[in-house]
């Protein structure tokens, strides 16, 4: 009976109110698949919007859906295990992978080692014993100058035959050039096949004209067809006019150009009026209906008719340079099939090459030779993929372990030994710096879920370079107060690359920030209320004084003898009834009783306070303050204990698997308040400080004296 395998001994650390696994050795990474996924902090994270090496995340994201999930993390670990001698090198996370660390006992390791050496050789470092991130950061540099690299594309470097190079260049000019792995423009098998199919279709269309000619040949067939398409409507128009002239002699003058039109045309610059000249009849219209192709032709058409006579009329009719109406009908019959054939012609990039080049394409079997070059390139696809494997392995060795410490656990974030990959930078605002900042694409949608985090969040629009670069962030404020934080206030944001952005608050999610804020909030509310009431009272008094001053001034003006008579005004208001003291006796009595009761209560309180021992007085004051601030502090304490990082990240596309709490001490560490550097000297003399006046001290002494006298009298 075999003994059961000893389970792997994990170590955990507690942070954020939950247990997180410690990944300390290569064996921990190798056994990660056996760790219950309920103990993972995250189950998924986005490829975009995180501050991590983008290339590594793309390698891990094998299904290319923009999300890295647990199975893909485990697959990346297993993929690395097939190629490394020890997992301890992943924990070391070196920037360069020693070639000796690659396992040569596996097929995958041998292939990766060979490709790594090939990369170093192409980079001019054949004797190097390690391959770094910088060595694989530019794949184009690795394949630069290579004609075959396994990507299925070919360039002019893929052959030394000049005419094949010319056809590759023509192909790139015909279709959108594909970028080869070497960085050079090239063509692919699909593009060659598409060009060849179009060339064959053109050849078939071109060859079909031979059967239509019925033994006759037209020199420069394509030119002849184009001339026919252009001139046939004009010739047909001429013979119709001649038939009308033969039908009625009076139509002869009408079918030719009226003299008035010729006079108008003669006054113009005929070089500029070419379209108007071309609109005139083709030749002089007569009942004889004979078209002389060389004499008497409208000047705008003369050059075309000269070629028309050579390429069409001569080969098909052999009638010289004159065409009668019957001969024109015969010519139309002969050209009808060719005209229909030509109308099926479709302009394309292939047809622009012309008959000679396309004939060469078929005779030299260019398509087959280019396909052969592509097949030769694809034979190296395995080696090229191995080069990609070397690139992937170098990235995993450098970045896979840091990724695990920001996915399986949030060690970097909670231990403050680094920064979480979700932290995009630091926001400086209102005399404090906020480290917990995340990028946001849609603030309104993000805020819907992020408000469940119970964090005080400010959403800021950030711009730099004159507004050419823009982004939005959400920053958590976890220390200080919110008295001066309002929409529209500006700050400065530094991203993880050190770039500075102008930040403006556009949205606020209000939650408690700190216990200190909760302690002072009742007094601030009372202070604001008293201040507002005093402002209202002062405003009312000022308004009354202004009204009285204005009324007195108007009365003086009206009593001046030289004053102009005032304009008629509205009748004076009815006289106010005399003040009846009797009606308000009860009110005055009630007010007096209230003031007396209030004074008695204050006096009783002060008397009781003065009877306390000296050491009891501070305790009494503390008790009163606790009574006032206690409820607010208790409520804030309960809410601060509920702060949770999960909803903030879930709103950004993460899948957080734990209640990642931000307790009060840790939360306070994420927002730093200003303090003077250690060893600084502070000059307290302010030349513009307000002058101190003794009336406050005198008033306090008088109040204390009055209280003492009152107590003495009562006793």
Image (tube, helix red, strand yellow):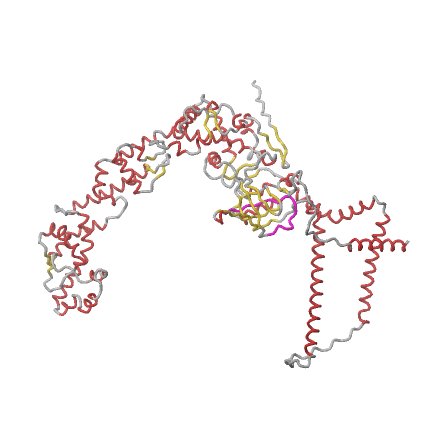
Q: Residue furthest front?
A: 687
Residue 424 in the image: state x and y as whole percent: 54, 41
Location of residue 527 by image quarter: bottom right
Residue 140 in the image: state x and y as whole percent: 39, 34
- Residue name at image x 23 percent, y 61 percent: 273
212 sits to left or right of 114:
left
125 sits to left or right of 534:
left
Location of residue 365 by image quarter: top left
388 sits to left or right of 212:
right
Q: Residue furthest right?
A: 715
In this rendering, does residue 233 appear at all? Answer: yes
Is 475 inside the magenta-drawn segment?
yes
Location of residue 147 by image quarter: top left
Q: Residue furthest left?
A: 319
User: Which quarter of the figure is the N terminus placed in?
Assistant: top right
325 is higher (above) or lower (below) than 98: below
- Residue name at image x 11 percent, y 61 percent: 289
110 is higher (above) or lower (below) than 500: above
First to last magenta residue range: 470-486
353 is higher (above) or lower (below) than 152: below
Residue 412 in the image: state x and y as whole percent: 58, 34
Residue 235 in the image: state x and y as whole percent: 16, 58
Is 13 inside the magenta-drawn segment?
no
307 sits to left or right of 382:
left
**714 and 224: which one is in front?**
714
């Amino acid at each position: 009976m075999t003994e059961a395998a000893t389970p792997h001994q994990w170590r955990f650390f507690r942070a954020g109110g939950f247990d997180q696994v410690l990944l300390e050795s290569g064996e921990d990474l190798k056994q990660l698949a056996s760790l219950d996924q309920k103990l993972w902090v995250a189950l998924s994270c986005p490829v975009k919007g995180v501050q991590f090496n983008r290339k590594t995340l793309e390698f891990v994201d094998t299904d290319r859906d923009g999300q890295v999930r647990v199975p893909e993390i485990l697959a990346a670990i297993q993929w690395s295990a097939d190629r490394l001698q020890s997992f301890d090198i992943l924990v070391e996370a070196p920037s360069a992978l020693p070639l000796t660390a690659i396992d040569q006992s596996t097929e995958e390791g041998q292939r990766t080692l060979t490709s790594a050496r090939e990369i170093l050789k192409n980079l001019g470092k054949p004797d190097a014993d390690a391959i770094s991130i910088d060595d694989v950061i530019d794949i184009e540099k690795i394949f630069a100058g290579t004609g075959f690299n396994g990507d299925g594309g070919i360039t002019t470097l893929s052959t030394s035959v000049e005419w094949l190079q010319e056809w590759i260049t023509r192909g790139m000019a015909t279709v959108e050039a594909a970028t080869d792995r070497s960085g050079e423009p090239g063509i692919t098998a699909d593009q060659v096949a598409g060009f060849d199919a179009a060339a064959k279709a053109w050849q078939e269309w071109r060859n079909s004209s031979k059967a239509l000619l019925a033994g006759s040949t037209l020199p420069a067939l394509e030119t002849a067809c184009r001339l026919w398409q252009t001139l046939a409507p004009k010739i047909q128009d001429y013979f119709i006019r001649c038939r009308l002239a033969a039908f009625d002699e009076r139509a002869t003058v009408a079918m030719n150009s009226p003299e008035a039109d010729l006079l108008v045309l003669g006054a113009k610059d005929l070089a500029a009026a070419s379209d108007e000249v071309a609109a005139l009849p083709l030749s002089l219209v007569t009942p004889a209906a004979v078209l002389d192709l060389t004499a008497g032709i409208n000047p705008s058409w003369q050059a075309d008719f000269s070629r028309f006579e050579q390429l069409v009329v001569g080969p098909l009719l052999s009638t010289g340079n004159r065409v009668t109406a019957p001969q024109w009908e015969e010519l139309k019959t002969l050209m009808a099939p060719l005209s229909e054939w030509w109308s099926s012609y479709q302009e394309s990039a292939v047809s622009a090459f012309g008959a000679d080049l396309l004939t060469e394409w078929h005779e030299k079997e260019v398509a087959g030779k280019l396909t052969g070059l592509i097949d030769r390139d694809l034979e190296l696809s395995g080696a090229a993929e191995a080069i990609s494997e070397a690139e992937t392995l170098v990235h995993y060795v450098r970045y896979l372990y840091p990724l695990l410490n920001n996915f399986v656990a949030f060690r970097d974030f909670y231990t403050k030994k680094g920064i979480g990959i979700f932290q995009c930078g630091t926001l400086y605002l209102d005399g404090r710096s906020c480290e917990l900042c995340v990028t946001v694409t849609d603030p309104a949608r993000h805020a819907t879920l992020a408000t469940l985090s119970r964090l005080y969040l400010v959403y800021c629009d950030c711009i730099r370079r004159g507004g050419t670069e823009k982004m939005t962030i959400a920053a958590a404020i976890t220390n200080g107060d919110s008295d001066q934080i309002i929409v529209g206030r500006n700050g400065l944001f530094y991203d993880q690359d050190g770039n500075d952005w102008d930040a403006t608050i556009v949205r606020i999610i209000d939650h408690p920030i700190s216990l200190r804020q909760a302690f002072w909030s009742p007094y601030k509310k009372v202070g604001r209320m008293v201040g507002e009431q005093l402002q209202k009272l002062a405003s009312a008094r000022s308004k009354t004084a202004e009204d009285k001053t204005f009324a007195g001034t108007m009365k003086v003006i009206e009593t001046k003898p030289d004053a102009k008579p005032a304009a008629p005004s509205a009748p004076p208001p009815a006289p106010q009834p005399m003040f009846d003291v009797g009606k308000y006796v009860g009110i005055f009595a009630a007010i007096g009783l209230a003031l007396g009761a209030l004074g008695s209560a204050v006096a009783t309180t002060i008397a009781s306070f003065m009877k306390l021992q000296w050491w009891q007085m501070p305790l009494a004051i503390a008790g009163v303050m606790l009574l006032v601030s206690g409820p607010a502090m208790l409520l804030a304490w309960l809410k601060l204990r509920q702060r949770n990082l999960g909803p903030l990240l879930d709103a950004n596309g993460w899948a957080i698997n734990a209640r990642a709490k931000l307790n009060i001490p840790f939360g306070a560490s994420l927002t730093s308040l200003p303090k003077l550097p250690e060893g600084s000297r502070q000059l307290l003399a302010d030349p513009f400080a307000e002058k101190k006046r003794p009336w406050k001290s005198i008033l306090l002494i008088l109040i204390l004296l009055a209280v003492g006298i009152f107590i003495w009298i009562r006793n």
